[in-house]
């Protein structure tokens, strides 16, 4: 490996390493991680939902349960897919 490639490596955040270790502590089989209800699917679902919720909050200008300060008609309807 060249020196340039080595310098581009990013060291993982120690807090994320601890979190990953804690999440993986009880998993023994591949299905536990990548199966239908595995850790990867659950984490992906949570991350995508949080990202979409944050995007919606930014777009609308208020939190999900926050008061509507803009009267543009662009508000949440209380339902999610």
Image (cartoon, rainbow, N blue to C red):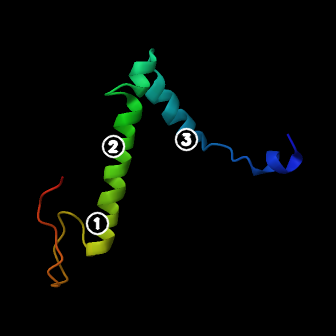
Q: Nearer the viewer, mark 3 or mark 1?
A: 1
Residue at image position (17%, 63%) is 65
In terms of image quadrants, where is residue 36? top left
Residue at image position (36%, 27%) is 38
- First in sequence, mark 3 or 1: give its number: 3
In terms of image quadrants, where is residue 52? bottom left
Report the Cα–Cα distance between label 3 and label 1: 28 Å
Does residue 8 appear in this view?
A: yes
Report the Cα–Cα distance between label 2 and label 1: 16 Å
- First in sequence, mark 3 or 2: give its number: 3
Q: How many labels does the image show?
A: 3
- The residue beneath circle 2 is 45
Does residue 26 appear in this view?
A: no
Secondary structure of residue under mark 2: helix
Outermost residue toward the right in this view: 3
- First in sequence, mark 2 or 1: give its number: 2
Residue at image position (29%, 67%) is 57
Residue at image position (43%, 25%) is 33
Crowd class of label 2 (few under 14; some 14 to 19; many from 20; radius 10 Å): few
- The residue beneath circle 3 is 15
Give the x, y percent position of residue 43.
38, 39
Give the vertical position of 43 relative to 74 (above or below).
Answer: above
Outermost residue toward the top in this view: 28
- The residue beneath circle 1 is 56
Crowd class of label 1 (few under 14; some 14 to 19; many from 20; radius 10 Å): some
């Amino acid at each position: 490996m060249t020196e340039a490639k080595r310098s581009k490596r990013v060291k993982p955040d120690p807090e994320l390493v601890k979190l990953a270790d804690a999440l993986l502590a009880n998993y023994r089989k591949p299905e536990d991680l990548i199966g239908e209800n595995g850790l990867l699917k659950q984490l992906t679902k949570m991350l995508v939902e949080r990202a979409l919720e944050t995007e919606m909050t930014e777009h609308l200008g208020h939190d999900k349960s926050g008061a509507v300060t803009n009267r543009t008609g662009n508000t949440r309807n209380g339902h999610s897919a």
